[in-house]
Amino acid sequence: MSRSVRVHWIGRRVDCTMSLVVGIDASRIRSGGGKAHLIGILSSLDPARHGILEIHVWSFQALLDSIPNRSWLVKHNPSALEKSLAKQLWWQTVHLSQEVKEAGCDILFTADASTLCRFRPMVVLSHDMLSYEPGVMRYFGYGYAGLRLLAIAYLQNAAFRRAEGVIFLTQYTAKVIQGSCGRIENYALIPHGISKEFMTIQPTTTWPLNGGRPIQCLYVSPIWLFKHQWVTVRAIEMLRAKGHDIVLTLAGDGDDDAKLRLSKQIATSDPTGVFVKLLGNVEHKAIPDLLANADMFIFASSCENMPNTVLEAMAAGLPIACSNRDPMPEILADGGIYFDPEDADSIAAAIEKIIANPELRLSIAKRAKVLSEQYSWLRCAEETFAFIAETYKSIKA
């Protein structure tokens, strides 16, 4: 029988008789969510609570510079990690295991599951769902992008099977990925945290009444085909045709195919640039201000592991119109209004429901805010390193 762990360690002191040295392979962490996760847990951790003497991190220099210096933290920046992807993969395959051993690490925490490293024992973090969602492959086809996703699934499944422990962010991802790689004997469900600056957001405006100003909708996410920004633009156009004074801000950059589809939809729906504003890529530190100036948050993705931007909108106390695809309902629960992300009519109906019902709008915003309080980087750090320490203890017992 598989052993699923959902631990609550805050406020408890665990067995600290070990003097554990932990290695972290963050050499492949390039996404915003992955970087935020590593920075969040290492900024919040008290390693002595788990019998951890020292932590070594291997990554590229820009990420290492973003992680606060700690007396127990050793940062490694092999030159290969600043070079081409091929050289990064070669280093991970050939050199990482030896470097981990030379650093005296007892166990390796791999922050990207598509690893080629063979060090044992190892705990792997699952961040990526693209290779596992059947409906997503149709957006990528079976050219280079599709073959790349298939290769990633193969690499990740191999890593999950050889790891001594696996960390999933949600119940949904644990179920789907085990359906592909097979039953995992030792895994934990440990969700992301939310940075404190999102918890303290104060809206800069009140909800617009009696046509005083447009309703400001915000969608923060990379522009990829499965994020359905172009469908969202069509939904906003439909609502404006019904008389709603509503505008949409899209924050994020993305791939060329998705941006082309979005630009074509904007050219059709909003050729004079009246109600769609494209910000492009925005730094994470700018997102709290975007949320503070929004009236509503929209999230129309059909493939996620655990969407940080939804958590951040929840913490900001915004009413949220959200995709009904898993794992979003697992996270947002009854704190939002759901829609089919591939159906403009469904998106428009969910948004209109929020507009038309002030009591509902206030209720879901408050509920989302309450739900967000369970997500913190302190909790994530405590649970993550407790699981790593317990996994090491169990294989050495």
Image: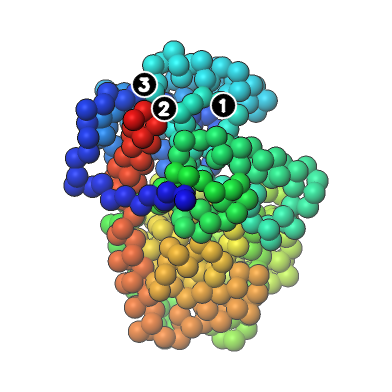
Q: Secondary structure at mark 3?
A: strand
Name the N-terminal-most of marks 3 and 1: 3
Q: Residue at x 64, y 75 (%)?
A: 344
Measured along the vertical axis of the image, is residue 289 above or below residue 10? below
Q: Is residue 116 visible?
A: yes
For disc 2, the marked residue is 107
Q: In this figure, which colouring scheme has been used for the structure?
A: rainbow
Q: Secondary structure at mark 2?
A: strand
The label number, if any, that marks residue 74 in the structure image: 3
Residues tagged 3 and 1 counted as in contact (Cβ below 8 A): no
Amino acid type of disc 2?
Ile
Q: Is residue 251 visible?
A: no
Where residue 157 appears, x then y in whole percent? 61, 42
Q: Quadrant of residue 155?
A: top right
Amino acid type of disc 3?
Val
Front label number (3 vs 2): 2
Q: Residue at x 65, y 70 (%)?
A: 342
In front: 341, or 192?
A: 192
The label number, if any, that marks residue 117 in the structure image: 1
Front label number (3 vs 1): 1
